[in-house]
Image (spheres, helix red, strand yellow):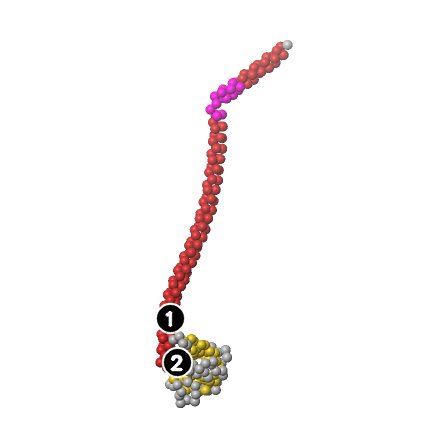
Amino acid sequence: MSRVGKTNEKRAEQRLRYRWPVRFAVKAGQKPLSGQAVDITSRGMAFLYHPGENCPRPDQLITANFGTPHFNAHGSFDTVFFNRVGRVCRVDSLSGKISRVAIQFAEPLFFKPGEQNISDSDAQQRLEAKARSVIKARQKTGTRDEALVEAENRARAETQRWVKTEKEAQKKVRACAKQIAKVRAEAAGEIARVSAEAANAIAGIEAEFTAKAATGDRAKDPGVEKKNGKQDAGQARDQRLLKKVDSFITDKSKVF
């Protein structure tokens, strides 16, 4: 990365050479494409892109988004971002895979990037130092991002396992509760059946016992048998006496 002075090209303004990304769109609403800046002035820039269907063509208008270093007096620089419409002046084929696209801005930049009162070596050092710091920052951020992604993946996996375990536990609890309710219902039915059968058996035994007790009392009571016998004997004597009286009366009537 370096800044050079005037060249044999038609550009009268000094240009700044640097390798920063450029995003551009050939058509309105098109997804931006990515190229790499080669050099820039306040009136135009050149960038590298792959030849092919999407490569800009001469006299075509494109919209470019890019950043440009603006050096300050503190040994560093600020990055100024621009959005410019430009007309393609030239497309040079550098190889079968790379083309150099030069565009002219419809509106110039507010400063001249190649003429900032800074030496070539100082500009080179600042740009390289900035590039190194950006690389280090990306590496650190990438490490943190990877650690964060890994932690998120572990947490997500753990959450999924917990949800699965919880669902399985709830399923088992519902199955156990259903089984317990079924057993309880079956037990209640069985208890009711056994209770009814026991009550019927007890009632039958009590009735049979009562009947046998009543029959046995009558058969075993001697007073009742003796009384009944006396009654029967008395009735027989009375009948015989009545017959004798009747016979006596009958005979007497015959005499008198």
What percent of the width, then of the height, locates residue 227? 51, 19
Q: Which numbered disc covers residue 178?
A: none
Which quarter shows the C terminus? top right
Residue type at numbered disc 2: Ile
Judge whether 154 appears above or below 35 on screen: above
Alpha-carbon neighbours of circle 1 within 10 Å: few (<14), some, or many (≥20)? few
Residue type at numbered disc 1: Ala
Residue 226 counted in the magenta span: yes
| Residue situated in front as seen by the camera: 182 or 14 | 14
What percent of the width, then of the height, locates residue 15? 41, 84
What percent of the width, then of the height, locates residue 224? 50, 21
Q: Does residue 5 appear in this view?
A: yes
In this figure, what is the number of numbered marks? 2
Q: Secondary structure at mark 1?
A: helix
Give the extent of the magenta segment: 217-233
Mark 1 or 2: the one toward you = 2
Question: What residue sits 47% from the left and 27% below the top?
Answer: 216
The residue at the far right in this view is 256
Which quarter of the figure has residue 152? bottom left
Name the magenta segment's main secondary structure: helix
Which quarter shows the N terminus? bottom left
